[in-house]
Amino acid sequence: MSETPTPLNDEESHLRAIVADYEKKMAETAALIARVRHEINNPLAALLGQAQLLLREELPDKSRKRVETIESLAVRINEIVAELRGIHSPSPVDGRDD
């Protein structure tokens, strides 16, 4: 027994297509964020490590302040990147009523 298309079925199909498109775009966005996070973290870790190594050395005050600024800004970027870890792909909508 086949269903006759009704305006409600057409609207439901249209809404499902919109949701599927949204889920695809959100998944692509989450993947992009993960790649960007990875590409930022690698050089950032090296930058932060080098700044911390420099701070172990005897430096003139002016140089030490500059290195401390570099370190604090690198830590700030690291915190911002860490916030991006909370962005995930949405769970697919399966259309079932629970």
Image: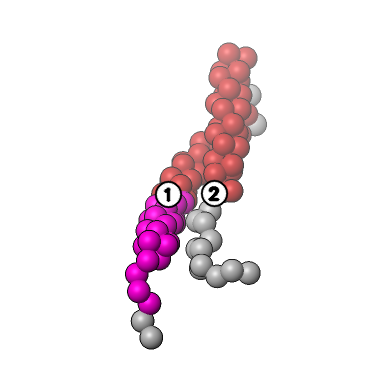
Q: Secondary structure at mark 2?
A: loop
57 or 10, which is in the foreground?
10
Q: Is residue 28 visible?
A: no
The prevailing secondary structure element of the residues shown in magenta is helix
Question: Is 27 in the magenta?
Answer: yes
Q: Secondary structure at mark 1?
A: helix
Query: How far apart are the two marked residues, 1 and 2, measured between alpha carbons?
Result: 9 Å
Q: Which residues are magenta?
A: 3-31
Crowd tier of the residue under label 1, counting other residues whose Cα lies within 10 Å: few below 14, some 14–19, many 20 or above = some
Question: Which mark identifies residue 29?
Answer: 1
Amino acid of disc 1: Thr
| Residue at 56% from the left image edge and 27% from the top image edge | 73
The answer to the question of whether label 1 and label 2 lie on touching residues, with beta carbons closer than 8 A, is yes
Q: Write down the residue under mark 2.
A: 87
**Residue at far bottom of view:** 1
| Residue at 53% from the left image edge and 53% from the top image edge | 88
Q: Position of residue 76 (x, y in %)?
A: 59, 31
